[in-house]
Image (tube, helix red, strand yellow):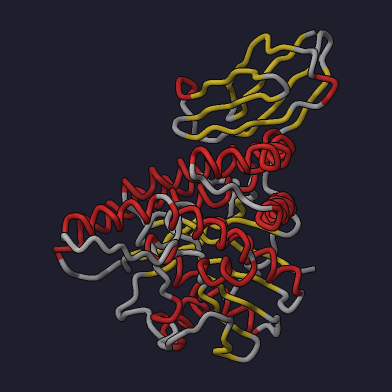
Amino acid sequence: MQKIYIFTGKGGVGKSSVAAAHAIKSAQEGKRTLLMSTDMAHNLGDIFVRKLGREPENVLPNLDIYEIDPEYVMRNEFSFIMEYLGKLLSENVVHKSAQAQAEKKGTGKTESNGLLELGMMPGMEELFSLLKILDVYHSKKYDRLMVDCAPTGETLSLLKFPELLSWYMEKIFPIGKVGVRVLAPITKAVLKVEMPNKHAMNDIEKMYLKLAELEELLKDRDITCVRIVTTPEKMVVEETKRNYMYLNLYHFNTDAVYINRILPPGIGNAFFAQWLEIQQEYIAQIKECFAALPVYEIPWYDEELKGVRAIQRIVDDVLACTDVFVSGAVMERETFIQTQDGYMLEMYLPGVDKEDIDLYQSAADLIVKVGNFKRNIPLPNILRSYTVAGAKYEEEKLHIHFVP
């Protein structure tokens, strides 16, 4: 069975190095492995000291690396969407901007390159990076995919994108296809706005279906697991706790934590004495908070982790003595339990302050909000006529009670 390993964490903690070490170990075990980066600030080429193109490149026996170019993916695989956005922007936003610049210069001439002038639209990078993961998985070319993700916030946005877009598409897209046919002539004549043609709408539908499939893939706990990389510092540890909680909110299978850049004991330098104490305090805290998960400790090396030889040190020191590729479901997904007077929904939300939890029912969905993140949970048909009677948070689980 193919496996997907997603590496995430706060920016600058060494996610790429840890992901690269796993990729090298996987390749050495004889598994066809792809190390791919969805971070727009790619650095796999820097780690392996080589210039990369727009397609996967072989660097070692059984190991390819791939830095995804989302604009290239969009232009080659969703050309009608690209064409429509280019036409829309060139006829409206870009045209007005170019016209204003021409008037300012006094030339009276406007020049516009459409979408290329504005670059990739916000959110598109994450979207097309996701879609490429699905394509690579379906190719069956690799046994293991190692995904080096962007820093925590962007990764969470990336991982929840399929569920969020699926929710909108299920409710809006059927109306949208009819609306496009009806409104296209009006908007073109009156508002001077180009509506997407049927080819663009088909591309949107294809994209939606792929995202729905990807959501199932990423939440399949037998296939995909998320691994958090952290360092023993207060701000990083606090974000790691929140990251773990949010990943559980969206029901991704987090199955390991890696503590990177641990100072070696006995340095014999007074400058590092307090740092050693601080690190040991936070290492103990991480192990206590993540007692249900395997925690790996990676030393702070005396050289820059650049090149295969340097990354091999992580493989030999940390990954060699254990089977780091064995992954299983650590916690259950949300479960509905029948009670005497209704139903109970249980959600595992570790490390949450109950004051930060908010929930409400909207038509056929239950909306659970924790801090700045919220999740729409579609209710089973049997609960469509039920309402939330109360909720209780205890032992790191949210219990939501439904009655008729």
- At horizontal 55% and vertical 77% (from top left) the residue drawn is 66
Asked where in the image residue 274 lies, by quadrant, the reply is bottom left
Front residue of 50/401: it is: 50
Q: Position of residue 240 (x, y in %)?
A: 44, 47
Judged left or right of residue 179, residue 240 is: left
User: Where is 48 relative to 247, above or below?
Assistant: below
Q: Looking at the picture, does residue 330 appear above or below residue 59?
A: above
Q: Quadrant of the N terminus?
A: bottom right
Q: How many marks?
A: 0
Q: Residue at x 23, y 57 (%)?
A: 101
Question: Which image quarter holds the C terminus?
Answer: top right
Report the side of 348 relative to 93 (left or right). right
* Residue 221 seen by the camera: no
Residue 114 in which image quadrant: bottom left
Q: Residue at x 48, y 49 (%)?
A: 287
- Quadrant housing residue 44: bottom left
Question: Quick one: 262 or 32, which is closer to the camera?
Answer: 32
Residue 289 in sight = yes
Residue 103 at x, y percent in the picture: 20, 55
